[in-house]
Amino acid sequence: MKNIALHSIHESLGAKMVPFAGYNMPVQYEGVTAEHLTVRESVGVFDVSHMGEFLVSGENALALIQKVTSNDASKLEIGDAQYSCFPNTENGIVDDLICYRIKENQYLLVVNASNIEKDWNWISSYNEEFKADLKDLSEDYSLLAIQGPKAIDAMQSLSSLDLADIPFYKFKVGDFAGIEHVIISATGYTGSGGFEIYCKNSEVEQIWEKVFEAGAEFGIKPIGLAARDTLRLEMGYCLYGNDIDDTTSPIEAGLSWITKFTKDFVNHEALAKEKEHKPERRLVAFELDERGIPRQGYDIVDGNGNVIGNVTSGTMSPCLQKGIGMGYVPTLFAKSGTQIHIQVRKKAIPATIVKLPFYKG
């Protein structure tokens, strides 16, 4: 297991450290519900330095990215970020990612920690044609997610940039916490606003300390990966390995909005055909109508007890105080308001298909 740069700090704060994607990561500090509500109501900080970062540069950087990703990166201005995915050749997804346009011919791709090697090999195999300059910066960079409605107010004293002037899915490169050339990105995985801060490993300890000094009067707290999962699920954000993987298409996963058929990309013809003819199954969101907690892998059944799918993500929502989840079902059952059941141990608990997000803010 690898250690992230702030490993000893997390241990000193009493974090429960667990192996995750090849790294020892802080999963929780004071408890999932308390940490979840801190982010919803004020501001919290996640250390997600296990994420992967690839720098793609050169005249053919955009051409390579256009080939391997589903979204249209030609729309990106310098300072823009874009959610996308790498389609595979079997109607599945290699990974989902965020693409940042840093300079004229330079892009940063941020990928999931568990897929760094797989993604690198995938992109490299297509780069034989384009010969863009590829660099894997994953081992050299740290990533802090400062999330919550008080994030702007809590962090403004740390930068000469106007943080309120960075729109959602935009970023600026500037000074932060006494460090120059930090990427300050108005992105995140919580649905409660805030920033993601990219810096070198040698800089992250100073940034961490200054972030907590500046945020003290706003009740800032460290937040673990467990609360990150409940927060993203309340928003209905897909998690790779749960809701999307090598066997799920972006069309059935509800990611048509990041799948642009105005360009040639890996497997675009098959995916266009699937979109035209409608997929046989869909990723849906559901709320339990009675007490219970849906968990990944639980069966989804119809009114007669027939298995029609399974839960890909599920939890007890700290904000809604009810069981929520996502899973794939035949398209027939995918309409909002449809009644299904979740098999929780020996009991089939009634549930209703709902529109996302679960948490409306």
Image: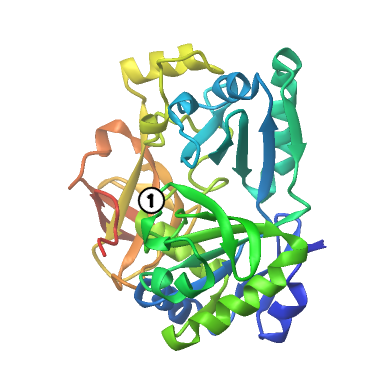
Name the residue located 49 percent from the left edge and 76 percent from the top edge.
32
Q: Quadrant of the C terminus?
A: bottom left
Query: What is the count of numbered marks?
Result: 1
Q: Which residue is mark 1?
A: 168
In the figure, residue 100 lies in which quadrant? top right
Outermost residue, left side: 337
Q: In the image, residue 78 lies at what x, y percent? A: 50, 37
Question: At which x and y percent is residue 274?
Answer: 39, 18
* The residue positioned farthest toward the right in the image shown: 1
| 183 in relation to 78, above or below | below
Q: Is the N terminus in the top left, top right, bottom left or bottom right quadrant? A: bottom right
Residue at 38% x, 74% y: name it. 150
Of 113 and 149, nearer the camera is: 149
Q: Is residue 124 above or below residue 297?
A: above
Residue 138 or 256: which is nearer the viewer? 138
Q: Residue furthest front?
A: 160
Residue 4 appears in view? no
- Displayed quadrant of residue 122: top right
- In the structure shown, which secondary structural element does the residue marked by tag 1 occupy? loop
Q: Report if residue 352 is visible in the image.
A: yes
Relative horizontal placement of residue 252, taking residue 107 as reference (left or right): left
Q: Is residue 256 above or below residue 89?
A: below
Q: Is residue 19 left or right of residue 94?
A: right
Q: Residue at x 56, y 18 (%)?
A: 266
Q: Percent x, y for residue 284?
A: 33, 44
Question: What amino acid does circle 1 point to?
Answer: Phe
**Residue 206 screen position, x and y as percent:** 69, 74
Most foreground residue, 239 or 354 = 239
Q: Nearer the viewer, residue 143 or 88?
A: 143
